[in-house]
Structure formats: structure tokens, C-alpha cells
Image (tube, helix red, strand yellow):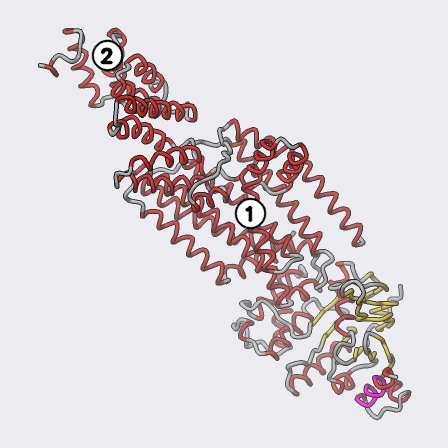
Amino acid sequence: MDEKIALKIEGLSKVYQLGRRKEVVALDNLALEVKQGEIFGLLGPNGSGKTTAIKLILGLIFPSSGTIEILGQKHTEVSVKEKIGYLPENPYYYRYLTGPEILNFFGRIFSLPEETLKERRENLLQLVGLENSGHLALKHYSKGMLERIGLAVALLNDPEFLILDEPTTGLDPIGSRETRNLLGRLQSEGKTIMLSSHYLSEVEKISNRVGILHQGKLLALGALRDLMTEWKASDIEDLFVKVIEWSKH
Amino acid sequence: MSKTAFRSRSIAAIILLFLILSPLQDSIDLQRRRMGFERRLMLMPGQVAGNLILGGFKGLAADLLWLQVESLFHSGQHYKMLPLFQSITFLQPKFITPWAVGGWHMAYNISVKAKNEEEKQFWIKHGVDFLAEGIKNNPERYDLYFELGWTYFNKVKDYANAVKYFELAAKFPRPEYVDDVLAHAYEENGQIKEAIATWERILAGPDTPFRQIAARMLSRLKKYGTTKVETYQ
Amino acid sequence: MVKALIIGLNTFRETLRLKSYQIILIFALLLLGSSQLFSFLTPEEQLKMIKDVSLSGIEIFAALLAIFTAMTSLRNEFETNTISTLLSKPLRRSEFILGKFIGSVLAITLSVILMAAVFSTLILIKQHSLEAGLFSATFLIWAEMLVIVALTLAVAAFASTAFTLIFVLFLFLTGHLTGYGLELAQQAKNPLLQALTKIFYKVIPNFENFAIRDEIAVGVSVSLSYLLKTFGYGLIYTFIALLLCLYFFQFREV
């Protein structure tokens, strides 16, 4: 087990059976590694398999074949989830709870001591800019506010490995920048971040390496600069389009 | 643990638990039979009652039928009450009132409407048999012993049987009037010694209006050998 | 276990806010109160009517609440996708299911207590006393609801809302009738039919075990050993149903 690798995926496939003869290959033999301390961007158009890959990593769905290791442990071990933070796409929580209450709820799932929980709750609410919304039930939150509380939930256990699925959806440009700055800060603290997004410019600004998925296959993997040189792309959008176009042939 | 291994172990555990459950169910069934919680299988007239039985709510079904009995009684449709008495007591044999009222109804109200003596006796006997059936289902209570004893005493004038059933009623917790009527039945049956003993028992008992009656009856019995003297004077 | 309690308390709080829970409970309390209306009966008959209507009402409404509560609490987790966030945390799927069970049971317990309080008040007004049998009957109704909650979770773990509702209601009805089926089979004198109905009788939850309300309403007493045996039956069956729930849920993709 290589401890410098935060995420190791080998031969990962997910096939959905639809009836007796039809099957859909959501992910085809994915292999990649995410190094500890880096920000890895998982890119791809809708239906490319990004969310499938994330759900497989988190154990929400089960692989047809292949292996996944997180921070040197099998991904199915419950203890590994103590070290992961996850922000789903379009986060949604229990409507009648307030921001502090939802953090309390998840904090107790992590068995955080009350003092630690209190401190983190206050710090995180301030970090995501929700310190003045403590009285509001989540049902009154805007989409952007839900993303921000989702981020607070994801950071509650001070995770080593953060998985973010479309983290800037619903955020305005200022909010997006604040999130990018935060992710940069988290990286400087030694955290590993994997984010899936189709906001290419956002990914370009913060990712160290990217992987481009299309129709379940990993078409490109590496440092952004190296890929742009290899594909003779002017920017990330150009790279993305060229890779997808190439796969069609 | 793999999916197959997990599922195999789950199924094994479930089967094991059902094997533990089976003798427990048998034990529960035995105890229910001993406590007299019988299952009664029958087809019911009346959709509502039938649906309720299908849900296992026999008591509620019996109550609804009893409301029908009330309604028929007040509107004088006495014959229509008969199948309802049968149904209610079948559904809930521990419900005393329909046995008591049904038996009384047959022996008194319906027999009075009979066209001839044969029919009259038929209905009196039917009432008596109905009460006897009620006693079989409720052998540990005074109520139906008393009702049957009263029917023998008041309607049939069979004092021997009246005494028999009043004596049985007197073995269980009962109101004071049971002993009072028993004493009268002893007298009518020629058992004067037993009648005196019963009045004396009432007199020695708790202070109720029946003590005054007992004192009066005792003095008449001892003086005249009967309690009826003043009544016919 | 602690995590299951956390999930359970949250589920309980969520359930109390459900409109369907509130409406069914209020309707139940009103109906129990209305059993006072049989004033044209004799006092003894009125008491019996109150006991029958109340105990039957408590059982029916508690069963409806049990099914709706358990079904909704699980369904909502899937529909809102909160389950993805939950299962991404260090929470076993068994702890999640146990938590849902605990939360639903807390909600049902509250509803049974409230209904029993109305019922007891009516009896006290009429009878000026409360016999132990009434508490026994209510206790067994509550024990029956443990089984119903667990069964609902087991079915909801793999089936749609409509199927869950219909199937569990069907089980509730059948569970009261399996004894009759057994008697019918014995009368038919067909060995194969008798064997099949016996298996059916042993496998389908026998809700008639918990049904002592009819006897309690006419003053028949029930022994402590019967209460304990039936409660034990309920606990074992609940455990079977929860195992079944886990069987379906452990590898369900969310």
C-alpha cells in the first residue's frame, strides 16, 4: 500500500443490466491515482460517468469489477469514511433543521466530542459565510446557501480527502471565487481534493491534474499543462473538445 | 463481506429465528385455547360485520350487531332479533348481555306472542336452552346461572331446577338479590330448612335492604311455615 | 448503537412534523372521543362499546401510522438524496436501518400513549376505575406495531411506496386471518393443504396473538406469562423483519 496515494482505482467498471439482453456500461475499466495533497479535477460531459465514479468510490453503488483504495484502505471499510469529506451535487438536508443543527447532527455521526464539535461548527459557519443564518431552517435556504452548508458538512470531520461533486453549482462569481480560495487553502493544509465539474474554467484555475471521462472511458489523464501541450490545446475548453472529438473517431 | 456471503448468512439467521418462533407460536396457541380465546369460523350476514371479522375485530362487529338489536327491540320487530342473538354470541361468546337478553326475549316476549300452547312451550324451552349454552361459554360467572334459574322459577315454575341454578350462581361473586331469590326458590321447592338457613345468612351478612327483607321473611317462615301469608291476606 | 439513536431521534423529530402523521393522529383522537355518543345504551353496554371502539381504533390507527411513518421516513431519504450524504459518513447501513426503526417506533409510541390517554379518560369518567387488562391490551397493540414498523421498512427497502402500502396492509389483514385458514384446512382434510397452511401460519406474522382487546372488553383477564410470550414473539418477528430489511438494503444502490 502506497501511502502517498490518496485514491487508487484499478480496472473499475460499472455495468447496469437493463432486461435480459441490454446493458449499459456506465464506467469502463477506469484506472487512475490521486496523489495526496493534490487537487484532481474529474471532467466530462453529462453522462460521462463522473457521478458514477464518485458513487463507486463512496460505496453508494457497487462495482461490477475492479478495486478502489482510499488512503491505503479498502474503500468499503467504514473507518475510511472518518477521513473523507463529501459534497454531493445539489446538496439537500433535513428541511426543518437549521445550519448549526445539521452540523450537530453530522458531528455526532462522526462521534466528535462536544467541545470540538462546537468549535468546528462556529468556525465552519464563519468560513462558509453562514454565521448570521443560524436561526433559519434549511427549507428557507437558497441554492447557494445549501451548497455552502454542504461544504461545511463536508469539512466537519477535518477530512484528509475531500470529494466535491459540482461544488460551484448555484454559486455566484464571488461565491465561486471564495470556494476556489478555500480549496487552495485546504490544499496548502495538506488535504487532497477531487472535484468533478463541468465548469471548465473553475477546474482550470485550481486543479493540478485532471482526468477527462467520456461515455465511461478515461480518455486523458495528467497535469493540465502537459495535456494541453500534448493535444495542442489553447485552453482547457479547447483540450476538452479535442479529446471528446477524438474519441468519436 | 461479499454480497453472496452476506445474503446467505442473513437467510440462515432468518430461518433459525423462524425455527425458534414456531414452538413459541404453538405455546401461545395452547394458552389462548386454555384461556378460552377461541377462533370461531363462520360466514356472516351483513357486510360491515363480515368485513370487521375479516379484520379480526370480532368485538366491534358484535357491538354493531348489538346496536341493530337495540333498534329492532324498540321498533317491536322481535323475531328479527333472533338470528342477531345467535350471531353476536357466536362472535363473542364471553359477551354476557346477548345471552341474558336473548334467553329472556325468547322465553318471555316471543312465547307470549305464540299462536298456541305448543309454540309457547317451544319458545320457552328455546330460551332455556339458549341460556344453558351461554353458561357453557361462561361457567365462571354468576350472571347466566341466575338468569336461567329465574326463568325456571318465574316462567317455567320448575322450582327444582330453579334451586339448582340459583345455587350455582351463589358460588360466584354476585349481588345481594341472588341469595334473596335463592331463599324464595328453596321455599317454593319445599326446602324450608335451606330457605331459613339462607335468610339467616343474609341477616348475618352486610347491611343492605335485603337484611330487613330477610328478617321479615324469617319471622313469617318460623311463625307460619311460609313467607306468603300477608301477600294473600 | 449511538449512531442509530442519533438517526432515530432525527427521524422521530421529522415524523412529528409530517402532515400525514398529524392528521391521522388527530382524527384518531377525535374518533376515540366520539365513542361517548352511545348514550342510549345501558351503562354496561356503553362501557363495552367504548372499550371495543377505542381498542380497535387504537390498533387500526396505530397500524396506519406505523406504515405511513416507516414508509415515509425511508422514502424521503431516497427522494431527497440525503441518504447519499449519510452513507458517505462512517455509518453502517445496519445502523441507518436501526435508526429508522427507532425513530418510527418512538413516533408510534407517542401516538399510542396519546390515544390510550384519551381512552383511559373516557373509561375513568364512566367507570371511575381502570382495570389492568386495558393496559395489557394497549401494551400488546404497541408490541404489534413494532412488527408492523419493521415489516414496512423491510418492504420499503426494495419496493415502491404504493407496493409497500398495499403489501403491508395485506399482511396486516392476513396476519389476523391465518388461524382461520388453518381451521378451514383442517376441515378440508387434505394433507397437502394442511401442510401448506401450517407453514403459512407459522411464517406470516400472527397478529391475532396480540388481539386480546375483545376479551378484555368483556372482562376476561390475561396472564403475565401470555403477555411475555406474545411480546417475545413480537420481538423475534421484529428482528426477522429487520434482518430482511438489511438483506434488501445492504447492497441496494443509492
Seen in the image, is C217 located left or right of residue B225?
A: right
Residue at 87 percent of width and 80 percent of height: A220
On screen, residue B71 above or below C251: above
On screen, residue C226 above or below C161: above
Q: Does residue A238 show up magenta in the picture?
A: yes
Task: Give the class, few, some or many, for how many residues have Cα within 10 Å of label 1's Cα (few <14, many ≥20).
Answer: many
The amino acid pointed to by label 2 is Glu
CB under 8 Å between discs 2 and 1: no
Residue at 71 percent of width and 41 percent of height: B15
Q: Residue B166, percent across and down?
A: 32, 18
Residue under mark 1: which chain is it in?
A: C
Q: Residue B233, percent across and down?
A: 8, 14
The disc placed on residue B188 is: 2
**Residue C76 can be seen, yes or no:** yes
* Nearest to the observer: residue B62 or residue C58: B62
Span colored in magenta: A237-244
**Image quadrant where residue B20 sits:** top right
Q: Residue furthest left?
A: B233
Q: Residue A94, percent across and down?
A: 58, 67
Seen in the image, is C27 located left or right of residue A121?
A: left
On screen, residue B197 above or below A248: above
Mark 1 residue element: helix
Residue at 37 percent of width and 39 percent of height: C48
Residue at 83 percent of width and 65 percent of height: A68
- Secondary structure of the magenta portion, mostly? helix
Q: Which residue is mark 1?
A: C172
Task: Give the class, few, some or many, for how many residues have Cα within 10 Å of label 2's Cα (few <14, many ≥20).
Answer: many
**Residue A193 can be seen, yes or no:** no
